[in-house]
Amino acid sequence: MSLFFFFLLLLLSSFSFTIEAQQQTYLFHYCPNTTIFSPNSTYKTNLDRLLISLTSNATAGSFFHNTTTGKHNSDIVYGLFLCRGDASTKGCQDCVSTATKDVSQRCPVEKTAVIWYDNCLIRYSNQSIFSTPAVVPKFYLINTGNVSNQERFNQILATTMNDGAALALNDTLPLKKFATSEANVSRFQTLYSLLQCTPDLTTSDCNTCLRGAIADLPSCCDGKQGGRVLTPSCSIRYELYPFYNQTAVSVSAPPPPLTPPAITP
């Protein structure tokens, strides 16, 4: 598959600190017309069943779920959803419900589709997509504001993103394949970053996906106050304002190791 790059300029003039209060924000979708199905086909029936299943599992409190529908190879649909690690249960439910309806409208006959919302991702295909890294298509979104000291900012951004990637790959933390990282840019400015992979990826594949996205930042978002890189398997974002739920992502320090009782000779 050839690599698709789309540069989108987003003017981020307002935001909410409360995830539940946010409307479900559509970002982008991708559904190539290389493989299509007819409206009355078995594949269409299986796809409808799959989207209902994804919505149902989001309602059950899952933040990631993958499943298949269909029995015959030509009609099997593989699908998954992933909610952002800081989203509330209700925010995840609402996003998946909205996205499954929306992708059906935007991709009415395509067998393969991905749709990105601010709080979730929906993906399905007629070929297995589970535990398989996908870094294309890739989309960039940028905040149009410029930073004042570009060289210093880029150094801080690189360090913060690399620190966040290391956290996302730490399987001992509660939120698997998800992390946020912060750094002071100045006395009055803080850099906020978020990184996430689909949790079915291996640590190695997640690392490759995140590192590739981070490596794209100088070309897509150089000197900008905010930017994102979206792929089907991972995404990264940074801003100069807290765009995620800081309470939800706070990780308490692990308890100290227990001291074994003294042995009296």
Image (cartoon, rainbow, N blue to C red):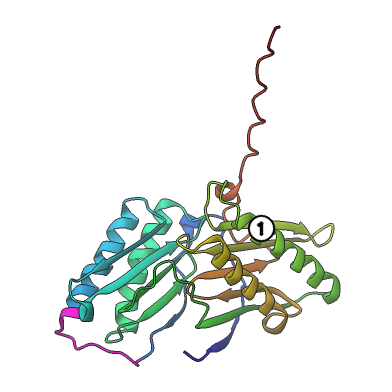
Residue 104 x/y as whole percent: 29, 78
Q: Is residue 190 left or right of residue 258?
A: right
Residue at x-position 52% and y-position 76% = 231
The chief SS type of the magenta part is loop
Q: Is residue 64 left or right of residue 45?
A: right
Residue 71 x/y as whole percent: 18, 71
Residue identified by numbered label 1: 166
Residue 85 x/y as whole percent: 51, 56
Residue 60 x/y as whole percent: 31, 51
Residue at x-position 67% and y-position 83% = 220
Q: Is residue 12 left or right of residue 147?
A: left
Q: Is residue 36 magenta?
A: yes
Q: Which residues are magenta?
A: 33-43
Q: Quadrant of residue 180?
A: bottom right
Q: Residues within 10 Å of mark 1 (few under 14, many from 20)?
A: some
Query: Which residue type carries mark 1?
Result: Ala
